[in-house]
Amino acid sequence: MATLMDVAKRANVSKMTVSRVINHPEQVTDELKELVYAAMKELDYRPNLIAKALVSNSTRIIKLCILEDIDVTEPYYMNLMVGIAKALDLHQYSLQLVTRRNFDIGNCDGYIITGLREKDVEWIQALKKPVVVFGENRYGFDYVDTNNKLGTYQIANLALEKGYEHLIYFGMDSTESFEQSREAGYLKQIQESKLIPKMYRFKNHSHLTEEFIEAHWTEFERNSVFICSTDRLAIGVERGIAKCGGNIPHDYGVTGFDGVFLNQVASPKITTVKQSIIEMGNACGESVLDKIANRGNTGSLIFEPKIEMGGTLRL
């Protein structure tokens, strides 16, 4: 079996450096970590992490708590988990997926939480281990998210540049920060353009927006664009317009927000604000490990939005 000294020789570093990479990776440069990890892989060297965990009172486990229903048809959370797992793997941590019902079963070194709602704040604040939230919040938790307000503002501006005259907002029926920010981006564009706001809110189900379009079809003028706060709402709008005989994108435009999967399977593909979910997951992992190492707040990280063109806005 390979030893610590074998790894040190293969990586051309000291035995102390290898030990530091294994036990205190936050104190070592990325370049050195890559050298040591490559040597460990080549030699099939496996440090005794169980013994290490017992000595340091560490589990080497990070829990990802998903506090909302997971829709198995959309790989949103799969992308998030891939990003988190990549970050944790570099530091020999494992990722454990838990739900609201079983989040407190077993120990861990820290938490990444998504789907946070106001009712969850009290018990999350009482957690003794470091916490990072995936998703903008107003409760003081460090978080990772897209700039939601800027994303909706930019895509609404793009719709105006394409010549649409009426901007209609279809948002989520939620008071959470990310939705309020997306709504604020729409309202900012409306105000600057001196237009009249027109807003509707729904649970995040495509059939609701599809049925609403059909029921109120005569109320929507031609040359309107529907600015939707999720791709799920947008795909329902698209289907509703198609059922009513509307022409997309010539007479009606549709935009979404997320850009993970549903925008790609829609026909035509939805122009959307694309979130970099894997990169954001990676940032969540790095952030919670940084909190564990430094025992303090790391601050929030906000990613810039990117518009991904589809066929639901004019060229």
Image: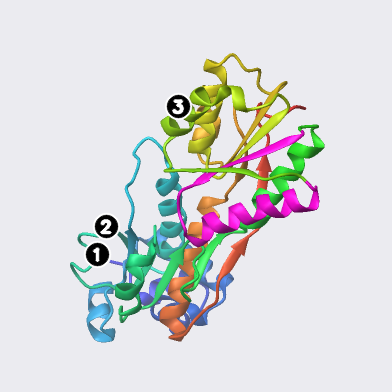
| Mark in front: 1 vs 3 | 3
Q: Which residue is mark 3?
A: 211
Q: Which residue is mark 1?
A: 103
Callout 1 environment at 10 Å: few (<14), some (14 to 19), or many (20+)?
some
Please state which of residues 278 and 3 is positioned toward the viewer in this rendering.
278
Q: In the rendering, at what x and y percent does residue 260 appear?
A: 51, 41
Q: In the rendering, at what x and y percent does residue 298 appear?
A: 52, 78
Q: Quadrant of the N terminus?
A: bottom left
The residue type indicated by label 3 comes to: Glu
Circle 3: element type: helix
Residue 230 is inside the magenta segment = no
Question: In the rendered view, does 169 fall on the left or right side of 205?
Answer: right
The answer for how far apart the CA atoms under marks 1 and 3 are is: 37 Å
Q: Answer whether residue 48 is visible to the viewer in this image.
A: no
Please state which of residues 2 and 110 is positioned toward the viewer in this rendering.
110
- Whether pointer 1 and pointer 2 mark residues with C-beta atoms closer than 8 Å, the reply is yes
- Please tell me the numbered disc located at residue 99: 2
The range drawn in magenta is 165-194
Q: Quadrant of residue 21?
A: bottom left
- Whether pointer 3 and pointer 2 mark residues with C-beta atoms closer than 8 Å, the reply is no
Callout 3 environment at 10 Å: few (<14), some (14 to 19), or many (20+)?
some
Circle 1: element type: loop
